[in-house]
Image (cartoon, grey):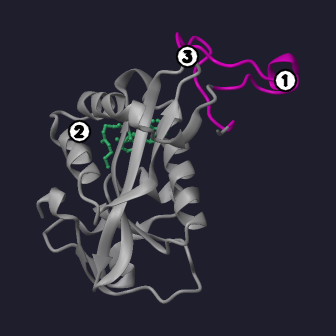
Amino acid sequence: MTDDDHSPDDSPLPSLSSPHDRDPGHPPAGIRWATRPETAADIAAVHAVNAAAFPTEAEADLVDALREDPSAWLPGLAYVAEAPDGSLAACALLTRCLVAGEPAVALAPVATAPAYQRRGAGQAVVRALLDAARLRGESLVLVLGHPEYYPKFGFVPASRYGIRPGFEVPDEAMMALVLDGSAAVARGTIEYPAAFGV
Ligand SMILES: CC(C)(COP(=O)(O)OP(=O)(O)OC[C@H]1O[C@@H](n2cnc3c(N)ncnc32)[C@H](O)[C@@H]1OP(=O)(O)O)[C@@H](O)C(=O)NCCC(=O)NCCS
C-alpha cells in the first residue's frame, strides 16, 4: 500500500478513512491502493484491465501468453493494485528477459483501468512490484514505455548502460533500472520472451 497518493476532493471514487482524515493539520488522505501478487482468481480481471487500458486486446493477450511460458513467467512477480472496494484497479508484470545472455526482467505491461487512472494506482503497483523483484535478488529491470512516466521510479535510458532492444525505438523510451548496484550490469541487446514477438 502507499499513502502518498492523492485524488481530487470531488473524487467519485471511494477512499479509506485514516487517522489523517481526523487531523485538521494534515491534508486529506488519497485512495489507499492495496498491492499484492496476482492470484489465479485475478486472471480474468487482469485481462479486463489490460484490455480496457490499451487500445486493443494485444496487451491482455500478451499477459495470457506470458503466463503460459514457464521460461518467461516469474511466479510472484505479477502484481495487482486493488481499489478500496476490492475491484482491480491496476496491474503490472515482470517477465524474464536476457541482456547479452544474462538474466534481467522486463516490466510490461503496466495498466490502470481507465476509471482509476492518474490516481496513483499505477505508481503503487509498479513500486510494489519493483520492491518484490529487489527482494528476490533481481538486479536489472527494463521497460519500453512513456519516458515521462518511468523516471519517477529511477529508470534512465537503457543506452546509458549500453543496453539496446533488437528493434528501432526512440532512445528515451527504452529504459533501465539497476536494482542491485553491486552487480556488474550486462551490456548488449535485450532478448524478450517469445510472446512479445520481437
Ligand atoms: C500509464 C499508466 C499505467 C499510468 O498509471 P496511472 O495509474 O494512470 O498513473 P499514476 O496515477 O500512477 O501516475 C500519474 C502521474 O503519472 C504521469 N502519467 C500518467 N500517465 C502517463 C502517461 N501516459 N504518460 C506520461 N505520464 C503519465 C502523470 O505525470 C501523472 O501525474 P499527474 O497526476 O500530475 O498528471 C496508465 O495511465 C495506463 O494504463 N495507461 C494506458 C496503458 C499504458 O499506456 N500503459 C503503459 C505502457 S508503457
Specify the segment rendered in magenta.
3-30
Q: Identify which residue is drawn at 36% across, 39% down.
A: 111
Per the model, the C-alpha gap separating discs 2 and 3 is 23 Å
Expressed as whole percent of the image width and height from the top left, the position of residue 12 reads 52, 10
The stretch drawn in magenta includes residue 177: no
Tell me the SS state at disc 3.
loop
Q: Earlier in the sequence, mark 2 or mark 1?
A: 1
The amino acid at mark 3 is: Asp
Return the residue at label 3.
Answer: 85
Expressed as whole percent of the image width and height from the top left, the position of residue 66 reads 25, 53
Q: Nearer the viewer, residue 147 or 164?
A: 164
Return the residue at label 2.
Answer: 60
Q: Identify which residue is drawn at 24% across, 58% down.
A: 69
Q: Do labels 3 and 1 touch, CB within 8 Å?
A: no
Per the model, the C-alpha gap separating discs 2 and 1 is 38 Å
Image quarter of the N terminus: top right
Per the model, the C-alpha gap separating discs 3 and 1 is 19 Å
Q: Nearer the viewer, residue 21 or 45?
A: 45
Where, by quadrant of the figure, is residue 132 drawn? bottom right
The stretch drawn in magenta includes residue 26: yes
Q: Earlier in the sequence, mark 3 or mark 1?
A: 1
Return the residue at label 1.
Answer: 19
Rendered position, 130 above or below 105: above
Q: Identify which residue is drawn at 41% across, 31% down.
A: 41
Name the mark on residue 79: none
